[in-house]
Image (cartoon, helix red, strand yellow):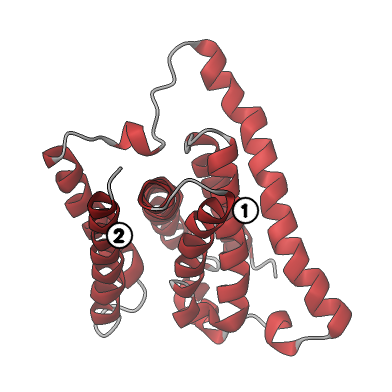
Amino acid sequence: MTLISRKFILLEILFFVVFALGTKAIALQWTPKYAGPITLILTLLILTQYMRLNGKSWAQYGLKQLVGVKPKLMVIPQALLVFIGFIIAVGSVLVLANVFQITVLLEVSDGVEARFGEVRGNLPKLFMWLGIVWVSAAFGEEMFFRGYLVTRLKEALPSSVLATIVAVLIPALIFGYGHYHYQGIRGFIMTGLIGLAFGISYLLLKRNLWPIILVHGVVDTLGFIGQYLGVE
């Protein structure tokens, strides 16, 4: 790949990242609760059309067709490996926070309650948010942050161990930043580490998004069920 081609890919990545974050910043002014899902889905719709114009599809970015029974069954053990990475990411923050009594990492931001508190004891709201998180978070975030960003960054950077680290790290930082506005520093660090774990898993699984989507969706589902039941 030529230097010009690499620079073009970097400009393309920059455009879609700025578009996603910029439209979200605007949407936060009039719909704080739903700004993220709305603007992410809009970004993915435009990105999908852009990919089609260039003869590409999401299958090339991780939504591979699972042909036959074995590939479908393999999603379960692969998802277990992804889940282990998730536990390590979350556990590292909690252990660090408790050992060193880091207050900012121990306290859940008030923004979380403001955004999701309506789910507690409200079954219609629970189902609404479960629909949102599976479409926007499980599928949407994994398609954009892991499938698109990690893949395109690897294509834009010279092949090396450092380039692979950068290709995983940058999307993880952007992913963490995307949660900062309502989760604070704790959310930025925790979701950033989760993004790092998911990015590594994406490459280890040879760019297969299905196990990561499954884990992301199930973890969020359990979280919302806990919120509905009032479990802290």
In this view of the protein, which residue sits in the foreground, 66 or 217?
A: 66
Relative vertical location of residue 133 with respect to residue 72 in this rendering, above or below: below
In this view of the protein, which residue sits in the foreground, 21 or 104?
A: 21
Residue 10, which numbered label?
2
Residue 188, which numbered label?
none
In this view of the protein, which residue sits in the foreground, 6 or 208?
A: 6
Can residue 38 be seen in the rendering of this structure? no
Image point 23% across, 65% down: which residue?
15
In this view of the protein, which residue sits in the foreground, 188 or 201?
A: 201
Image point 66% across, 53% down: which residue?
86
Helix, strand or loop for disc 2: helix
Relative vertical location of residue 88 with respect to residue 170 in this rendering, above or below: above
Image point 51% across, 70% down: which residue?
176
Q: Amino acid at mark 1?
A: Ala
Relative vertical location of residue 5 with respect to residue 226 in this rendering, above or below: above
Foreground: disc 2 or disc 1: 2
Q: Quadrant of the C terminus?
A: bottom right
Helix, strand or loop for disc 1: helix
Q: Amino acid at mark 2?
A: Leu
Q: Using the rendered view, name the quadrant where residue 24 is placed.
A: bottom left
